[in-house]
Amino acid sequence: MSYTTQKQVDGQFNDVIEQTISALENEGFGVLCDIDVQATFAEKLNEEFRQYRILGACNPELAYQGLEEEPELGALLPCNVIVYEKDDKQVIVSAIDPNQLIGVTDNSNLSSIAMDVSDRFERVLDSL
């Protein structure tokens, strides 16, 4: 079972990060957190790791609708989008599949919100 949607993107890693953030903004998402996994592992573990960033994306309107319906949904937010460099220096952008994410809630009333987020993430990936 796949829990993400992904795309290989041509370009330099930092450029792809900026393109991804811009594409998310175009779809109504803000990036609430930006976790640099490579830097964190270097600092905390003294370990080398590939370039890898976790972008915590949130669309306030959709988050509001979801939390009104399911207060515990906050434990699953924000929706994560990851950008990482493979061993061959190819850059991958991958977004959580919101349908899989809300599946754990067993609340069918969230399905339309998950479909909206899914459509927006597809457009983000298509634009890269």
Image (cartoon, grey):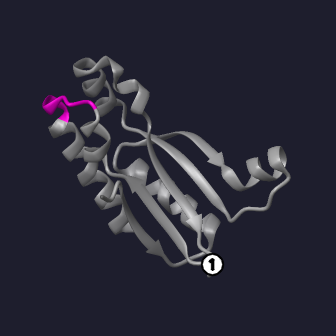
For the image, the number of numbered tags is: 1
Q: Residue at x 40, y 25 (%)?
A: 74
Out of 28 and 58, give the one closest to the viewer.
58
Which residue is under mark 1? Answer: 89
Q: Residue at x 26, y 51 (%)?
A: 118
Residue density around tag 1, few if under 14, some if 14–19, many if 20 or more, within 10 Å: some
Q: Quadrant of the C terminus?
A: bottom left
Q: Residue at x 44, y 36 (%)?
A: 78
Measured from the top left, where is residue 48 in percent x and y? 79, 62
Quarter of the view holding residue 33: top right
- Furthest-bottom residue in this view: 88
Tell whether 40 sits left or right of 77. right
Q: Quadrant of the N terminus?
A: bottom left
Identify whether 105 is placed above or below 81: above
Measured from the top left, where is residue 58 in percent x and y? 41, 37
Secondary structure beneath label 1: loop
Q: Which residues are magenta?
A: 105-110
The amino acid marked with disc number 1 is Lys
Q: Is residue 109 magenta?
A: yes
Q: Is residue 34 magenta?
A: no
Measured from the top left, where is residue 68 in percent x and y? 25, 18
Tell whether 95 sits left or right of 13. left
Out of 109 and 113, give the one closest to the viewer.
109
Identify whether 68 is placed above or below 39: above
Q: Residue at x 55, y 72 (%)?
A: 91
Out of 70 and 46, give the one closest to the viewer.
46
Measured from the top left, where is residue 99 in percent x and y? 25, 46
- Furthest-front residue in this view: 1
Identify whether 51 is placed above or below 111: below
Quarter of the view holding residue 47: bottom right
